Amino acid sequence: MTDALSHRERIKAIIQGKTPDRPAISLWRHFYHRESTPQGLAGAMLEFQKKYDWDFMKINPRASYHVEDWGNRLAWSTDEFQKHRKIKFAVNKIEDWDKIEPLNPSAPVLAEHLKAVSLIKEGSDRELPLLMTVFSPISIAGDLVPDGKMLMKSLTDEPNRLTEALENITTTFENYVVELRNAGADGIFFATTEWASEDMMTYEQYAKYARPYDLRILKAAGADGLNLLHVCGKNNFLKELADYPVKLFNWEGYDPTNLNLNGGLRLLRGKAIVGGIDHTGWLLHATPSEIKCEMSRLKEQFAGQKLIFGPGCTIEPIVKAENIIAARKGVV
Protein backbone atom coordinates (compact mmCIF):
# COMPACT_ATOMS: atom_id res chain seq x y z
CA MET A 1 0.00 0.00 0.00
CA THR A 2 1.41 3.37 -1.03
CA ASP A 3 1.27 6.26 1.41
CA ALA A 4 -0.90 9.16 0.31
CA LEU A 5 1.43 11.76 1.83
CA SER A 6 5.17 12.21 1.73
CA HIS A 7 7.12 12.16 4.99
CA ARG A 8 7.40 15.93 4.94
CA GLU A 9 3.69 16.41 4.22
CA ARG A 10 2.75 14.00 7.01
CA ILE A 11 4.88 15.76 9.62
CA LYS A 12 3.52 19.14 8.51
CA ALA A 13 -0.07 17.89 8.75
CA ILE A 14 0.44 16.63 12.31
CA ILE A 15 2.05 19.90 13.43
CA GLN A 16 -0.89 21.80 11.95
CA GLY A 17 -3.40 19.59 13.77
CA LYS A 18 -4.71 17.92 10.63
CA THR A 19 -5.41 14.21 10.28
CA PRO A 20 -2.68 12.55 8.20
CA ASP A 21 -3.03 9.43 6.07
CA ARG A 22 -1.36 7.44 8.85
CA PRO A 23 0.51 8.17 12.10
CA ALA A 24 4.13 9.27 11.75
CA ILE A 25 7.04 7.51 13.42
CA SER A 26 10.81 7.75 13.84
CA LEU A 27 13.38 5.88 15.89
CA TRP A 28 17.07 6.69 16.18
CA ARG A 29 20.24 5.05 17.46
CA HIS A 30 24.04 5.23 17.46
CA PHE A 31 26.30 3.22 15.19
CA TYR A 32 29.47 3.44 17.31
CA HIS A 33 31.59 1.43 14.89
CA ARG A 34 30.83 3.83 12.02
CA GLU A 35 30.84 7.26 13.67
CA SER A 36 34.49 8.17 13.30
CA THR A 37 34.22 9.54 9.73
CA PRO A 38 31.62 11.65 7.89
CA GLN A 39 31.25 8.92 5.30
CA GLY A 40 30.73 6.22 7.92
CA LEU A 41 28.18 8.24 9.85
CA ALA A 42 26.26 9.27 6.74
CA GLY A 43 26.26 5.71 5.42
CA ALA A 44 24.92 4.30 8.68
CA MET A 45 22.15 6.89 8.90
CA LEU A 46 21.10 6.39 5.28
CA GLU A 47 21.05 2.60 5.58
CA PHE A 48 18.95 2.77 8.75
CA GLN A 49 16.50 5.06 6.94
CA LYS A 50 16.36 2.84 3.87
CA LYS A 51 15.63 -0.22 5.99
CA TYR A 52 12.81 1.26 8.08
CA ASP A 53 11.53 4.32 6.17
CA TRP A 54 11.14 6.74 9.09
CA ASP A 55 9.07 9.92 8.76
CA PHE A 56 11.99 12.09 9.84
CA MET A 57 15.65 11.34 10.39
CA LYS A 58 17.21 12.29 13.68
CA ILE A 59 20.89 12.36 12.75
CA ASN A 60 22.81 10.72 15.60
CA PRO A 61 26.39 12.01 15.47
CA ARG A 62 28.97 10.71 17.86
CA ALA A 63 28.00 12.14 21.21
CA SER A 64 31.31 13.99 21.68
CA TYR A 65 31.47 15.87 18.38
CA HIS A 66 30.62 19.17 20.06
CA VAL A 67 33.63 19.09 22.43
CA GLU A 68 36.43 17.47 20.44
CA ASP A 69 37.64 20.67 18.77
CA TRP A 70 38.16 22.15 22.26
CA GLY A 71 40.39 19.24 23.25
CA ASN A 72 38.33 16.26 24.42
CA ARG A 73 39.74 12.97 23.15
CA LEU A 74 38.33 9.48 22.79
CA ALA A 75 39.50 5.97 22.15
CA TRP A 76 37.37 4.91 19.18
CA SER A 77 35.13 1.89 19.49
CA THR A 78 35.01 -0.60 16.64
CA ASP A 79 32.19 -2.49 18.33
CA GLU A 80 28.64 -1.69 17.22
CA PHE A 81 27.39 -2.12 20.78
CA GLN A 82 30.20 -0.42 22.73
CA LYS A 83 30.51 3.34 23.27
CA HIS A 84 33.74 5.22 22.62
CA ARG A 85 35.92 5.61 25.71
CA LYS A 86 36.67 9.12 26.99
CA ILE A 87 40.39 9.55 27.62
CA LYS A 88 40.92 13.33 27.86
CA PHE A 89 38.87 16.35 28.90
CA ALA A 90 39.48 19.94 27.87
CA VAL A 91 38.70 21.39 31.30
CA ASN A 92 40.40 19.74 34.28
CA LYS A 93 40.70 22.75 36.58
CA ILE A 94 38.67 25.91 36.86
CA GLU A 95 41.32 28.00 35.09
CA ASP A 96 40.91 25.82 31.99
CA TRP A 97 37.58 27.49 31.25
CA ASP A 98 39.67 30.41 29.96
CA LYS A 99 40.81 28.16 27.08
CA ILE A 100 37.27 27.69 25.77
CA GLU A 101 37.25 30.27 23.02
CA PRO A 102 34.81 30.63 20.10
CA LEU A 103 35.30 28.11 17.32
CA ASN A 104 34.74 28.55 13.62
CA PRO A 105 32.36 26.10 11.88
CA SER A 106 35.40 25.05 9.86
CA ALA A 107 37.07 23.59 12.97
CA PRO A 108 38.03 20.00 12.02
CA VAL A 109 35.41 17.94 13.87
CA LEU A 110 32.60 20.46 13.39
CA ALA A 111 33.45 20.54 9.68
CA GLU A 112 33.36 16.73 9.54
CA HIS A 113 29.81 16.77 10.80
CA LEU A 114 28.75 19.46 8.35
CA LYS A 115 30.11 17.12 5.69
CA ALA A 116 28.11 14.24 7.13
CA VAL A 117 24.90 16.29 6.99
CA SER A 118 25.66 17.24 3.38
CA LEU A 119 26.23 13.59 2.46
CA ILE A 120 22.99 12.55 4.13
CA LYS A 121 21.11 15.30 2.33
CA GLU A 122 22.58 14.19 -0.99
CA GLY A 123 21.73 10.55 -0.34
CA SER A 124 18.20 10.92 1.01
CA ASP A 125 14.79 11.67 -0.42
CA ARG A 126 14.22 15.44 -0.48
CA GLU A 127 10.86 14.79 1.20
CA LEU A 128 12.57 13.34 4.27
CA PRO A 129 12.99 15.95 7.05
CA LEU A 130 16.49 15.89 8.57
CA LEU A 131 17.11 16.96 12.17
CA MET A 132 20.74 17.32 13.26
CA THR A 133 21.58 16.83 16.92
CA VAL A 134 22.87 19.91 18.73
CA PHE A 135 23.48 20.04 22.48
CA SER A 136 22.60 22.91 24.79
CA PRO A 137 25.54 25.09 25.86
CA ILE A 138 25.30 23.98 29.52
CA SER A 139 25.35 20.38 28.33
CA ILE A 140 28.43 21.07 26.21
CA ALA A 141 30.11 22.67 29.22
CA GLY A 142 29.21 19.58 31.22
CA ASP A 143 30.92 17.36 28.66
CA LEU A 144 34.12 19.43 28.73
CA VAL A 145 34.76 18.40 32.36
CA PRO A 146 35.37 14.95 33.89
CA ASP A 147 32.17 15.06 35.95
CA GLY A 148 29.17 17.22 36.76
CA LYS A 149 30.51 18.12 40.20
CA MET A 150 33.26 20.17 38.63
CA LEU A 151 30.80 22.14 36.52
CA MET A 152 28.68 22.90 39.59
CA LYS A 153 31.79 23.90 41.55
CA SER A 154 32.70 26.28 38.74
CA LEU A 155 29.19 27.70 38.81
CA THR A 156 29.49 28.32 42.55
CA ASP A 157 33.15 29.39 42.87
CA GLU A 158 33.95 31.06 39.53
CA PRO A 159 30.64 31.99 37.87
CA ASN A 160 32.22 34.71 35.74
CA ARG A 161 34.73 32.24 34.27
CA LEU A 162 31.98 29.75 33.51
CA THR A 163 29.73 32.44 32.06
CA GLU A 164 32.47 33.56 29.69
CA ALA A 165 32.95 29.98 28.52
CA LEU A 166 29.19 29.55 28.04
CA GLU A 167 29.15 32.76 26.00
CA ASN A 168 31.90 31.40 23.73
CA ILE A 169 30.21 28.01 23.40
CA THR A 170 26.94 29.72 22.49
CA THR A 171 28.58 31.96 19.91
CA THR A 172 30.20 28.89 18.37
CA PHE A 173 26.94 27.03 18.00
CA GLU A 174 24.88 30.06 16.96
CA ASN A 175 27.13 30.16 13.92
CA TYR A 176 27.22 26.39 13.57
CA VAL A 177 23.48 25.82 13.43
CA VAL A 178 23.26 28.31 10.56
CA GLU A 179 25.80 26.20 8.68
CA LEU A 180 23.89 23.02 9.54
CA ARG A 181 20.81 24.48 7.91
CA ASN A 182 22.90 25.48 4.89
CA ALA A 183 24.25 21.92 4.70
CA GLY A 184 20.74 20.50 4.42
CA ALA A 185 19.32 20.08 7.91
CA ASP A 186 15.64 21.05 8.15
CA GLY A 187 16.14 21.88 11.81
CA ILE A 188 17.91 20.77 14.97
CA PHE A 189 17.24 18.14 17.59
CA PHE A 190 18.17 20.34 20.55
CA ALA A 191 19.19 18.15 23.47
CA THR A 192 19.59 19.30 27.07
CA THR A 193 21.03 15.89 28.07
CA GLU A 194 20.88 15.44 31.86
CA TRP A 195 21.21 19.12 32.75
CA ALA A 196 17.59 20.27 32.50
CA SER A 197 16.78 18.27 35.62
CA GLU A 198 16.36 18.77 39.35
CA ASP A 199 18.92 16.00 39.75
CA MET A 200 21.65 18.30 38.44
CA MET A 201 20.69 21.86 39.41
CA THR A 202 17.80 24.00 40.55
CA TYR A 203 15.61 25.60 37.94
CA GLU A 204 16.77 29.00 39.20
CA GLN A 205 20.31 27.97 38.26
CA TYR A 206 19.13 26.61 34.91
CA ALA A 207 17.26 29.84 34.22
CA LYS A 208 20.46 31.82 34.76
CA TYR A 209 23.16 29.57 33.29
CA ALA A 210 21.30 27.68 30.57
CA ARG A 211 18.00 29.11 29.39
CA PRO A 212 19.32 32.36 27.83
CA TYR A 213 21.93 30.43 25.86
CA ASP A 214 19.41 27.78 24.78
CA LEU A 215 17.13 30.45 23.37
CA ARG A 216 19.97 32.01 21.40
CA ILE A 217 20.76 28.69 19.74
CA LEU A 218 17.12 28.08 18.87
CA LYS A 219 16.80 31.58 17.43
CA ALA A 220 19.86 31.00 15.27
CA ALA A 221 18.40 27.70 14.06
CA GLY A 222 15.54 29.68 12.51
CA ALA A 223 11.87 30.08 13.27
CA ASP A 224 11.17 28.29 9.98
CA GLY A 225 13.21 25.26 11.08
CA LEU A 226 11.73 21.93 12.11
CA ASN A 227 13.30 22.30 15.53
CA LEU A 228 12.73 19.80 18.35
CA LEU A 229 13.46 20.21 22.06
CA HIS A 230 14.61 17.00 23.73
CA VAL A 231 14.42 17.32 27.53
CA CYS A 232 16.42 14.36 28.73
CA GLY A 233 16.59 12.47 32.00
CA LYS A 234 14.57 12.11 35.17
CA ASN A 235 12.90 14.90 37.16
CA ASN A 236 13.12 17.08 34.09
CA PHE A 237 12.21 20.72 33.54
CA LEU A 238 9.68 20.10 30.78
CA LYS A 239 7.10 22.33 32.48
CA GLU A 240 9.58 25.19 32.77
CA LEU A 241 10.74 24.85 29.16
CA ALA A 242 7.29 24.43 27.63
CA ASP A 243 7.47 27.94 26.16
CA TYR A 244 10.62 27.24 24.13
CA PRO A 245 10.09 28.28 20.48
CA VAL A 246 10.16 24.85 18.83
CA LYS A 247 7.70 22.88 16.71
CA LEU A 248 8.28 19.54 18.46
CA PHE A 249 8.86 18.36 22.05
CA ASN A 250 10.38 15.05 23.15
CA TRP A 251 11.08 13.62 26.61
CA GLU A 252 11.03 10.35 28.56
CA GLY A 253 7.31 10.09 29.24
CA TYR A 254 7.51 6.59 30.69
CA ASP A 255 9.76 7.68 33.54
CA PRO A 256 7.59 8.07 36.67
CA THR A 257 9.43 11.26 37.70
CA ASN A 258 8.33 13.05 34.51
CA LEU A 259 4.99 13.97 32.96
CA ASN A 260 3.51 11.11 30.97
CA LEU A 261 2.31 11.60 27.42
CA ASN A 262 -1.21 12.67 28.43
CA GLY A 263 0.21 15.16 30.92
CA GLY A 264 2.59 16.51 28.32
CA LEU A 265 -0.16 16.96 25.77
CA ARG A 266 -2.18 18.96 28.31
CA LEU A 267 0.84 21.04 29.32
CA LEU A 268 1.92 21.86 25.80
CA ARG A 269 -1.60 22.86 24.73
CA GLY A 270 -1.70 21.60 21.20
CA LYS A 271 1.99 21.70 20.37
CA ALA A 272 3.32 18.62 18.59
CA ILE A 273 5.04 15.86 20.51
CA VAL A 274 7.40 13.04 19.59
CA GLY A 275 6.93 10.14 21.99
CA GLY A 276 4.81 7.18 23.04
CA ILE A 277 7.38 4.42 22.51
CA ASP A 278 8.86 2.92 25.67
CA HIS A 279 12.40 2.42 24.36
CA THR A 280 13.78 0.88 27.57
CA GLY A 281 10.64 -1.17 28.22
CA TRP A 282 8.47 -2.91 25.69
CA LEU A 283 10.43 -1.90 22.58
CA LEU A 284 13.52 -3.55 24.07
CA HIS A 285 11.97 -6.52 25.87
CA ALA A 286 8.61 -7.40 24.32
CA THR A 287 7.90 -9.78 21.45
CA PRO A 288 6.95 -8.40 18.02
CA SER A 289 3.35 -9.51 18.51
CA GLU A 290 3.20 -7.69 21.86
CA ILE A 291 4.64 -4.57 20.24
CA LYS A 292 2.01 -4.79 17.51
CA CYS A 293 -0.72 -4.85 20.15
CA GLU A 294 0.82 -1.94 22.07
CA MET A 295 1.09 0.17 18.92
CA SER A 296 -2.57 -0.54 18.11
CA ARG A 297 -3.56 0.56 21.61
CA LEU A 298 -1.53 3.76 21.36
CA LYS A 299 -2.94 4.62 17.94
CA GLU A 300 -6.46 4.33 19.32
CA GLN A 301 -5.68 6.22 22.53
CA PHE A 302 -3.97 9.17 20.82
CA ALA A 303 -5.95 9.38 17.60
CA GLY A 304 -6.40 12.99 16.59
CA GLN A 305 -3.58 14.26 18.81
CA LYS A 306 -0.50 16.09 17.56
CA LEU A 307 1.68 13.05 18.17
CA ILE A 308 4.54 11.55 16.20
CA PHE A 309 5.51 8.15 17.55
CA GLY A 310 9.08 8.03 18.80
CA PRO A 311 11.23 7.02 21.78
CA GLY A 312 11.98 9.10 24.85
CA CYS A 313 15.68 9.00 23.95
CA THR A 314 18.10 7.16 21.68
CA ILE A 315 17.24 3.47 21.44
CA GLU A 316 19.86 0.90 22.41
CA PRO A 317 21.78 -0.73 19.54
CA ILE A 318 20.80 -4.12 20.97
CA VAL A 319 17.09 -3.60 20.20
CA LYS A 320 16.17 -6.46 17.86
CA ALA A 321 15.43 -5.64 14.25
CA GLU A 322 12.16 -7.57 14.43
CA ASN A 323 11.01 -5.32 17.29
CA ILE A 324 11.85 -2.21 15.31
CA ILE A 325 9.99 -3.62 12.32
CA ALA A 326 6.96 -4.36 14.50
CA ALA A 327 6.91 -0.75 15.75
CA ARG A 328 7.26 0.59 12.23
CA LYS A 329 4.50 -1.65 10.87
CA GLY A 330 2.34 -0.53 13.76
CA VAL A 331 1.60 2.80 12.08
CA VAL A 332 0.55 1.32 8.74
Image: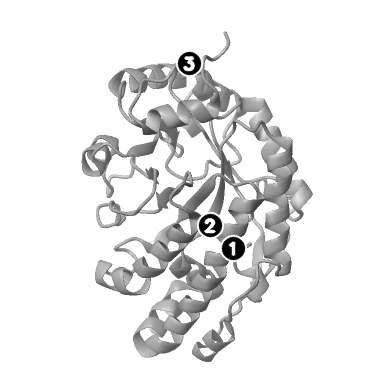
Is 179 situated above or below 141? Answer: above
Where residue 166 sits: x, y (%)? 46, 76
Q: Secondary structure at mark 3?
A: helix
Q: Secondary structure at mark 2?
A: strand
Cα distance in 3D space between marks 2 and 3: 35 Å
Contact check, label 3 and label 1, Cβ < 8 Å = no
> Residue 289: which disc?
3
The mark that comes first in sequence, 2 or 1, is 2
The mark that comes first in sequence, 3 or 1, is 1
Q: Quadrant of the N terminus?
A: top right
**Residue at 63%, 52% in the rendered image:** 182
Residue 50 sits in quarter: top right
- According to the image, label 1 marks what residue? 176
Contact check, label 2 and label 1, Cβ < 8 Å = yes
**Residue at 51%, 50% in the rendered image:** 188
Cα distance in 3D space between marks 2 and 1: 9 Å
Q: Specify whether 80 is left or right of 317.
A: right
The mark that comes first in sequence, 2 or 3, is 2
Looking at the picture, tell me which residue is in the foreground, 293 or 180.
180
Looking at the picture, tell me which residue is in the foreground, 130 or 160.
130
Residue 12 sits in quarter: top left
Query: How many numbered dots are placed on residues in this image?
Result: 3
Q: Nearer the viewer, mark 2 or mark 1?
A: 1
